[in-house]
Image (cartoon, coloured by chain):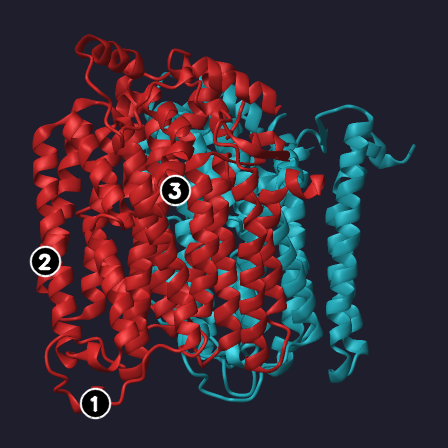
Amino acid sequence: MDFFREHILSFTLFYPLVGVVLVLLPKKDEHVRWLANIWSFAGFLLSLPLVFWFDKNADGMQFQERVNWIPSIGATYHLGIDGISFLLIMLTTLLGFISILCSWSAITTRVKEYYAFFLLLQVGMLGVFMSLDFFLFYVFWEVMLVPMYFIIGIWGGPRKLYAAIKFFLYTLVGSVLMLLSILTLYYAYHTQFGQYTFDIIDLLRVNLPRHTQIWIFLGFFVGFAIKVPMFPFHTWLPDAHVEAPTAGSVILAGVLLKMGTYGFMRFALPLAPLGASDDRIVKLMVTLSLIGIVYGALVSLMQKDWKKLVAYSSVSHLGFCTLGIFAMNPNGLAGSLVQQINHGISTGALFLIVGIVYERRHTREISEYGGLSSIMPIYATLFMIVTMSSIGVPALNGFIGEFTILQGAFEANHLWAGIAVSGVVLGAAYMLWLYQRTMFGPLSNPKNQSLKDLNVRELAVLLPLIAWAFWIGLYPKPYFDILEKPVAKIVERVHPGYYAKAAAAEHATMEPQHPAQVASPPDASAEDHTAHAAAEAGAAK
Amino acid sequence: MNGGFSEFFNRNDYFLITPAVLLALFGCGILLIDFLHDTRQKFMNALTALVGLSFVAYQLIRIQNQMDAVQMPELAGLNNSLLVDHFAIFFMLVCVAATFISVLISVRYMEIEHENHGEYYALMLFSLLGMYFMITGMDLVTLFIGLETMALSGYVLAGFLRGDKRSNEGAMKYFLLGAFSSGLLAFGFSLLYGISGSTNLQTIAQALGQRSSGDPLASLALLTTVTGLLFKVAAVPFHQWAPDAYEGAPTSITGFLSTGPKAAAFAFLMRILLVGLAPMRDSGWKPMLIAVAIVTMTVGNLAAVTQNNTKRLFAYSSISHVGYILLGLVAGNETGLKGIAVYILVYAFMNLGAFTVLVALRHGNVIGDEIEDLSGLFFRNPGAAVMMLIFLLSLAGIPPMAGFLGKYFIFLSLIETGHTGLAAFAVLYVAVSLYYYMRMTVMMFMREPVEREPLTLSPGIRIALGLTLAGTVIIGLYPEPIIQLATSAILR
């Protein structure tokens, strides 16, 4: 058990890889399906002990594993998680299982390869969130593109080839530029400390002038902004989402996009703090986020295609996430991460909901539907809950995330929050209008009159997500507790002395603290983060 | 050793040319025993060639061990016209490996073409013999003779399909432009000799170092020599021969030409630029190489996008790879040179792997060089399709395949030497290259096959696929030994 506990990350990471080989063995499609579902469900269970073992009070990375990999270039197999990656990993293992479960009847051709690619994708995604070594990270980051390319390209819609290659090329352009930033940091470390290393915790010690850091940040920015995607790099997203099979969309929206925001929080901000906190950069990032919020929402309003609407709503929601990141205060960052989880839950669920009717009717035109609530009451109810979650109605998860982000944005600049609020309003408009057009009104289309309501499997796919939405909505405290330390680290990194100043200001005005406030000054605040990271790296060795 | 020769040659000289002697013996041997075999036994020629190559590889390793035993970083022989060091051994081993795999994939292919003559394998060995002197030569004459031995065998091999018009045309172009570029190179060499009064590269370097930087004679010598060298590695704008020669040659020879002779040509180029022309680096050949690398990557990658013939596509892709490799010389530091060594080694495996799959497509009337011939390969032979995918991803530089490693070192060396703009330019072409490699992937995985029957692989192809796949994947996942090997090859 101790062995398992020490290596739980490796187990979780490579468990799906074993599945890749196993699903290729059975001869019958039916057996492949059962095997893949059971295997991925067990994969989710395998990651569950993390929930109990994860120590929210621990400083720094947990469950670290470190083995030399390529000593001559300083690449290591270094895994470890903190609160940020912990939440994203749990999201990945859950959505990984759900997306495999939801493909049961949707995928009828080339079943083996489908599940093999999905499990391989799972390895790539988990690896990205677990890696603490840039070389390792980059390997997983690229590896994951290949299965996704095939999932869209083989099982996608009519324009699948175009969408698949567009997805691949866009992401690759970003990631090769990111590679240059990584190499610049790597080389800078070598000149300053006389040793090659890709270890992220070591690289935090690099000292570079603002000018260089801005360039490094921009390299990261292109890589991550394409992945998020931030306006104007979002054009691959609608194509990929519309053409991808349902499960592909769920994973794409639920997990892949989070890699971009995760990248900003884990790498771009801490490793190029002077670049990230440069006034021009912040203005640019926030402007792009705000444009993304409003533009994504406006375009969603105009969509005739159900899935495309959800896809564009992602652009808007991810705009909130990046806005929170670049507010660069505890509320913004913590809110952003909670919102990333929320988006995984609610947009993942929305894609599942589109997929359920698409499987029955094979069309996504909104005008083809209407009045479905009368014949699919359970479906309509669940869709209502998911809609509420997506537009941020209190008691559901979306509210918590958006509210905290807006709070963070407001602390940074009132105008940002003002513009972002319009995104919430527009979000409510397009979602409710979608709901009205599809669920209410007369059931006029004869093709819809014999639609069946959800079956047990479809319920099983949706209910966990809805339960999670309520959990975050009603009792978000554990999430903010988990995020407090890692977020404080990032904030200290980009705004040294932030907590000391905040505490002083609070003391001066004696304002009562807001309940949702996560900016309580943690004990690590005064500590010099650089020294801290160095000590941690030493301990890891 | 009291004979008449001993005043000219010592034991060391004999020892250092044993690989070349072995190649010559086995080459001539194949020509002789070819007459003994009837048509069904022609595979024995290939087998003999493989045995010869194994001996050569063994002998190279012996030379390396001998060097380590006497703790000399290099062994010079034949009046300093030959210099064997770790660098030479490394590149020669790459060439031997490339030839070995090319022989493996040739057997079935040449049978189908009804051209399975002994000369074919003999010429490959003679070509390798030329490469040995290109790689180890320290003297302009030795280098030039090595180059011509390699190239002449190459011209014949490219035109080996005598009944095929394209093969004749390609070989003719290859020959004419090859002869022209050899002429240029010889002209440059003669000027270098005129400047220094010696054919030894180190003496030339000394003589050039004493000249002022704007010296017209030195500049002319540099210009002609470098142009000749760039012809040999098929860098733009001296690349026109490559697509036609690659398209016309037997597919197995295309694979061979794009790896073995290319590796030798790069060793040759590095020897001349880094030893002989070293004093003219910063104001002389470095700016030239920057310009050539940029246009090479541009033309190679953009032209490859529009090709529908896979051999032409690979010709342009190989041109674009030359662009990346030249960037390592532009950076010119330890990382850059290490990058070139790793790149060339890895390229030999992944490119030959891809060509092995193309060769496997040849059957009946299907030549297998149109991109459509790949369609539905996954349904006809899933293993071959997946391996091809791995080779293509590696060529595009997607980790964890080995191809990434070469690019990694090249990009890092550019950053280390402050060529960030050039690095940004080079990485963006990675995305372009991915596009044309993925076109083949689309054919293999997302198109219905034109013909239904499964594709069977001959034993030679299977072994070749195994070797190239192992090279591509294992070096990708655990590159430490290869990096150390490359480092020792570069550090003298």
**At x 42% / y 19%, what residue is drawn?**
A206
Numbered disc 3: what chain? B
Numbered disc 2: what chain? A
Q: In terms of depth relative to the viewer, which is nearer, A350 or A180? A: A350
Quadrant in the picture for the C terminus of chain A: top right
* Chain ID for cyan: B
The amino acid on which the numbered mark 1 sits, given as a three-letter code, is Lys
The image shows residue A507, relative to residue A480, as above or below, that is above
Distance between the alpha carbons at the discs numbered 3 and 2? 66 Å
Residue B135 shown left or right of residue B1 in the figure: left
Numbered disc 1: what chain? A
The amino acid on which the numbered mark 3 sits, given as a three-letter code, is Thr
Q: In terms of depth relative to the viewer, which is nearer, A30 or B75? A: A30
Location of residue A277 (image quadrant): top left
| CB under 8 Å between discs 1 and 2 | no
Q: Mark 2 Cα within 10 Å, few/some/many (few <14, many 20+)?
A: some
| Tag 1 residue | A447
| Tag 2 residue | A429
Colour assignment, chain A = red
**At x 22% / y 60%, what residue is drawn?**
A387
| Tag 3 residue | B227
Q: Nearer the viewer, mark 3 or mark 2?
A: 2
